Image (cartoon, rainbow, N blue to C red):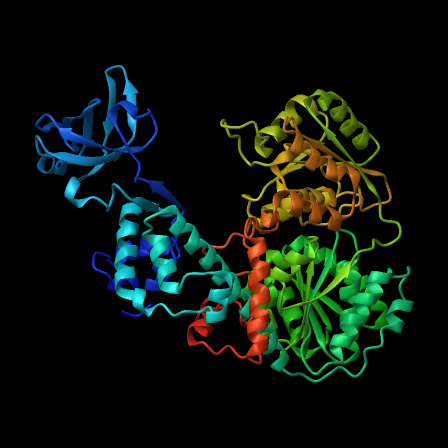
Amino acid sequence: MALQDSILKLPGIGPKKAELFENLGVRTLWDLICLFPRAYEDRTALRTIDHLEPNEPACFEAMVISDPRTNHIRKGLDITHVTVADQTGRLKLTFFNQRFAAANLRYGESYLFYGTMEGGFTGTGMTNPVFEPLSQTGTVTNCILPVYPQTAGLTSKVIRKAVQLAMERCLDELPEVLPTHILKRYGFCDCKTAYRYIHAPESFAQVELARKRLIFEEFFVFSCGLSMLRARREQVSRSPMTNTDMTAFVRSLPFRPTGAQTKAMAEIAADFRRPAPMNRLLQGDVGSGKTLVAAAAMYCAAQNGLQSAMMAPTEILAEQHYKTLSTFLKPHGIRCRLLTGSMTASKKREVKQAIQDGSCHVIIGTHALISQDVSYHRLGLVVADEQHRFGVAQRAALAEKGENPHLLVMSATPIPRTLALILYGDLDVSVLHEKPAGRQQIDTFLVDESMRARINAFIRRQVSEGHQVYIVCPAVQEDEENSMKSVELWSQTLQQAVFPDLRVGLLHGQMKGAEKDAVMGAFAAGEFDILVATTVIEVGVDVPNATLMVIENAERFGLSQLHQLRGRVGRGSAKSYCVLFSSHKNAETLQRLRTLCKTNDGFVIAEEDLSQRGPGDFFGSRQSGLPVFRMANLTSDLSVLTDAKDAADEYLQQNGGFIGADGLSQRIFTLFSDNFAALN
């Protein structure tokens, strides 16, 4: 069998089971072999019956001292009882709907059992343990048993059997992707050994050997792939722009751009003058002026007869960009148009015609920009706002509307340089470190429940002065298992019991898109005094009138996310504040939150987050364009990534940038199959 064969070729897997496996991302035998265990159960250490602990799974040897008795209780319920013993005691075993137990457990014979002892009114016992005859142990007893990720309808046992079958048929086909000198340098085992150890280890030392090699392998393949993407991008050509002078645009502004903005504009202009499409990440903290830099790039494109398209994640944000860009570009005769899904059919037709005939130079919109019936006149620049809100395929679809257009990706999430290299390793990066003049410094306070009454009074004062307030909760609905504030219950409590005379709005991610836009639009229009929301507002419309951000259960969020939420206020001329509520007692957690009170610099906060929590906060949800790692963990394996990246750079340098090994080429293609077009 070949690695790319469907799992349907395995005995015991039909269409229905294959559909369940697809829920785990498994379609081929290779997918199955790469479905790594999430944990291991140590079934090698034997205990005696008198040393079994309640609620603690264990392996023990015992003799059957009673004939198994099966009682038919009712339809669909059979119970088998049997008693076993060793030199230290006896134990009653109960099997539900497992008649095979009666047939396989023989009086007077000894077996190895694995299960969890339970205590009750009738004494201790064990339910549904697995067992094997002493002569046949090693499958489910007296072994280190891999535990696989599960999905409804598929048990770990079924998955384990399928993986074993795939390994039997394909192990010899696994290609070695790591060069020999790297295997020797780092002391790694070979490929086949690694996969055998990870799925059927005889010791935890073997598991660790396999893990080290497989984590490095994934990062090595990933690093080689990024280099290939960059090389491939550099092979694509387009006509350089002849007019990249932005002086007239800058002179028309009512303020002077920051040094960082000026530098970013110069970097973009230099990209435009090259005979290859720009692929640049514009990274800037909240309020650093990314939109102005994008406007300068659009001005440049228009001076060269090219159209620009900006895709925003929501309609309300698209409308905001449309207003801002129109203000910057209209004085230069550059016509901007808005295209969103909620427009009337006739309005859409009118805008699409203007896009097609070139009478509009800049198009701002949502996913409507990539509709099949949208045809561009001369699309030369694509701007993607809030990169992580878009799928790779969506960016690729917009880029394909033109002929190798320039790409500018904007991100308001401050990312430490190490992680920026991981996320955007194939993109050139411009960073906006400075904030434009006039931007408000936001005072941030960490408080507990003892301050609740004072903060409520402060909220009321802000509203009485004509301002608005955000209140962010970590959950949508109430959860009895923890004390997290939920937006649904908390908004009701605030409206009915705390601020009955104020207008309280509710916003969360489970609402439909149009409903969310309507609520956010109403808040922006001043129709609500208080908006109780989840992190759905993290990337949202500017509401200059909002001066206070209150975040409940602040310990539930990462520092970078808290900083993003805080950036929703301080956008007008009035003094703005952020209040972090936390009743957490852990000193480390509170110290982490105090970082927000000390600084408003998103990059400092991001570095602090990285050192305290690892990069998990940046990868809490899958980032667009970032392949899914099967074994590697960006939170705990960052140092391995550095080694793998160095090894990949060295390997490519030695080979003149050529990926020689067939196995490595295939792995790179598989890992990046969804990303080549978008990151080209």
Is residue 349 placed above or below 533 in the rendered structure? below
Q: Quadrant of residue 130?
A: top left
Q: Quick check: 664 left or right of 125? A: right
Locate the N terminus by quadrant. Answer: bottom left
Locate the C terminus by quadrant. Answer: bottom right
Which one is nearer the viewer's eye here, 249 or 527? Answer: 249
Is residue 421 placed above or below 537 in the rendered structure? below
Image point 75% across, 53% down: which residue?
285
Instruction: Give the percent coordinates (x, y) of residue 237.
Output: 64, 83
Image point 19% across, 27% down: which residue?
93
Instruction: Give the percent coordinates (x, y) of residue 564.
Output: 70, 46
Q: Quadrant of residue 132?
A: top left
Residue 679 seen: no
Instruction: Give the percent coordinates (x, y) of residue 579.
Output: 74, 33
Image point 28% across, 26% down: which residue?
117
Image point 15% across, 43% down: which residue?
135
Which one is nearer the viewer's eye here, 647 or 2? Answer: 647
Which one is nearer the viewer's eye here, 554 or 380? Answer: 554
